[in-house]
Amino acid sequence: MIYPKRLIDKYPSQLALLLALTGGCFILSGLVYFVMGQIFFHVPLSALPAIMAQKENANASRLIINVVTAINFGLPSVVLANMISRQPYQQLGFNTQVQIRQFGIVVLITLASILLAGSLAELNEQIPLPKSWAIQARAMENEYMKAVMAMAYMPTFLHFIFTLLTVAAAPALFEELLFRAGFQPIFIGLTRSPFWGILITAVLFSAIHFSYYGFIPRIALGALLGLVYYYGKNLWLNIFFHFLNNALIVIQLYTAGLSGKSIEKVMDEKMPFWWGLMAIFVLVGLFRQFNRASAKYWKNPPSLFTINQPKDGTAMGQDI
């Protein structure tokens, strides 16, 4: 299969359009956030975060967050795909060519990535910061924990399902649309290097979460998601990977709440450094198996370091 000819061929033009669309969608989502906040809570904009963090408002807050996430992260890539391709959903990677073995390997990759992220969280914690920066970074982490605590309120199974949709399903779908289906192919085309395109996208993916102490682990997660998309050629695999990673956290929070355990301990993801080294070796073997499972869909075996592309910067698409 060959991706369809794009209507806007230049990668710089695609990047400019995607950035403009993303900025516009952030403004639109802010307006939607304000309007929905008024509908549900009837409070000033400045009071919305505190109101939404209250346990009794958990389900309404989750609905608002899902809508905002869809606009922020899902809409830009969908609009761009419709502008640059006559087959936009194929362009985004919603392909039907997939096999159960690929999903099975992605499950194992997800589990190994948790070990890697945990050891990198410990490494991230050890990197020194100027005192003023450290205070600001810790304040951002505290705000993040407040949001997690609000989301972790799951007194019933129905609350658990709503939380899965908000924390696991919505980010998995919409973030993968923006970063892997949107930015990654453009950065690969601009750099003419899958390695650098995946890495730049992973850094951007981590930065958008505004968490210093989770910055390096999220780069690693973004890179693994990027590799799955590059070699698997199927966004459904990425959505499954991302969903499973987030869902495991939600399940831990839910079971911790039922058993009365500390949520703070559940959220402490730091692990010994040697676990990360072990995870790297496991991930190398898993990706070899994943690539073999995906090879039947490649027209030309892709390389991680080079890409055949015209020097004029026009978009060729990826042959699979």
Image (spheres, rainbow, N blue to C red):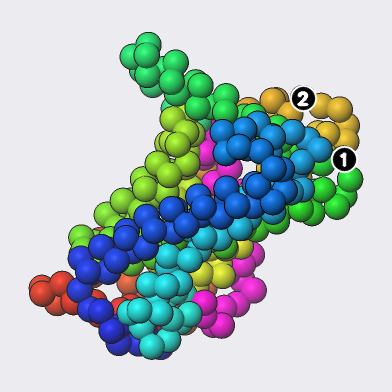
Q: From this view, report whether residue 218 is shown above or below residue 201.
A: above
Task: Tell me, yes or no, whether the highlighted magenta stretch contains residue 233.
Answer: no
Quarter of the image where one finds residue 154? top right
The circle on residue 262 is: 2
Q: Position of residue 34 (x, y in %)?
A: 57, 48
What amino acid is at disc 1?
Pro
User: Which residue is painted at 37% across and 11% down in the image?
Assistant: 131
In primary-sequence order, the first of circles 1 and 2 is 1
Quarter of the image where one finds residue 179? bottom left
Q: Position of residue 85 (x, y in %)?
A: 36, 83
Quarter of the image where one finds residue 249? top right
Q: Is residue 59 visible?
A: yes
Residue range corresponding to the magenta coloring: 94-120
Q: Quadrant of the C terminus?
A: bottom left
Q: Position of residue 57 (x, y in %)?
A: 77, 41
40 with respect to 306 (left or right): right
The circle on residue 125 is: none
Q: From this view, report whether residue 307 is shown above or below residue 241.
A: below
169 with respect to 10 (left or right): right
Q: Residues within 10 Å of mark 2 (few under 14, many from 20)?
A: few
The circle on residue 155 is: 1
Q: Is residue 108 visible?
A: no
What amino acid is at disc 2?
Ser
User: Which residue is painted at 27% across and 69% down in the image?
Assistant: 14
Task: Tell me, yes or no, whether the highlighted magenta stretch contains residue 98.
Answer: yes
Q: Quadrant of the N terminus?
A: bottom left
